[in-house]
């Protein structure tokens, strides 16, 4: 398996080199010529037409991850829509980059936690959750569990929920466990789908 780091020639990052000692720095043109099925390709989001490059390489079966110096939820969605399997900060520690590589090589998707919360909150609103009452879905929850469930569905982290409701993060986690059990879901994404009144598979 080949590790390719696609940049414009000025982006070699020591942390990235520490994570993947055998990796090769290549230009976008070289990546188009060299990358193939099963290769790991890391694309910097500051190169021109990076989305088109991601789509092309992902279409060949390469495992593409996008790195950004200024990650945003919008760019994360653009990367995933283009076919990337991972999206991370370009200055992430070497240990995190190796985790990204491991997860994406095992068919997983990697997005930073803080961005995932924003993406999930956006998905909740896009599915109509913000405009619906969710009375039926939330009828079996206590008032505090209901408040936690709605805050999480809006994309808030456990820390943000704790601050908003003036409780500890441990209490938020306990409420989430109870919410998941009562609603028959296993994670935040399924919770969002349930509250948006979509079928959870």
Image (spheres, rainbow, N blue to C red):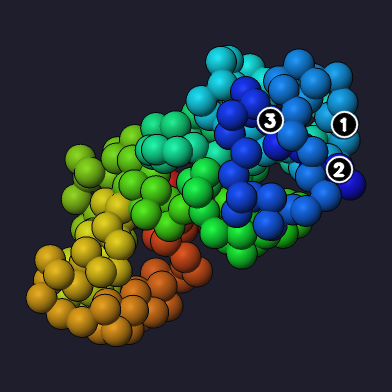
Q: Is residue 163 left or right of residue 120?
A: left
Is residue 96 or residue 190 the one in the foreground? 96
Residue contact at pointers 1 and 3, CB within 8 angstroms: no
* Label 3 sits on residue: 6
User: Mark 1 or 3, which is nearer the eye?
Assistant: 3
Between marks 1 and 2, how big is the CA–CA gap? Answer: 9 Å
| Residue at x 10% of width, y 76% of height | 166
**Sequence-wise, which precedes: disc 1 or disc 2?**
2
Of pointers 1 and 3, the one earlier in the residue sequence? 3
Pointer 1 with pointer 2, Cβ within 8 A? yes
Q: From the image, tell me which residue sits under label 2.
A: 2
Towards the viewer: 32 or 128? 32
Mark 1 residue element: loop
Across and down, in percent, residue 85 comes to: 64, 42
Tag shown at residue 36: 1
Query: Horizontal and vertical percent for residue 44?
Result: 58, 32
């Amino acid at each position: 398996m080949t590790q390719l780091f696609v940049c414009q020639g000025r982006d070699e990052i020591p942390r990235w080199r520490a994570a993947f000692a055998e990796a090769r720095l290549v230009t976008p043109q070289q990546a188009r010529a060299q990358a193939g099925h099963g290769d790991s390709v890391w694309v910097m989001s500051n190169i021109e037409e990076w989305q088109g490059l991601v789509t092309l390489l992902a279409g060949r079966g390469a495992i593409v991850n996008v790195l950004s110096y200024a990650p945003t939820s919008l760019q994360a969605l653009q990367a995933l829509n283009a076919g990337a399997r991972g999206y991370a900060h370009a200055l992430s520690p070497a240990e995190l980059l190796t985790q990204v590589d491991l997860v994406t090589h095992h068919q997983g998707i990697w997005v930073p936690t803080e961005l995932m919360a924003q993406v999930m909150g956006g998905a909740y609103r896009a599915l109509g959750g913000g405009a619906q009452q969710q009375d039926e879905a939330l009828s079996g929850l206590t008032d505090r569990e209901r408040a936690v469930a709605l805050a999480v569905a809006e994309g808030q982290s456990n820390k943000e929920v704790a601050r908003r409701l003036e409780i500890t993060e441990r209490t938020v986690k306990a409420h989430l466990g109870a919410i998941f059990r009562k609603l028959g879901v296993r994670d935040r994404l399924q919770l969002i789908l349930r509250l948006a009144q979509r079928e959870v598979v």
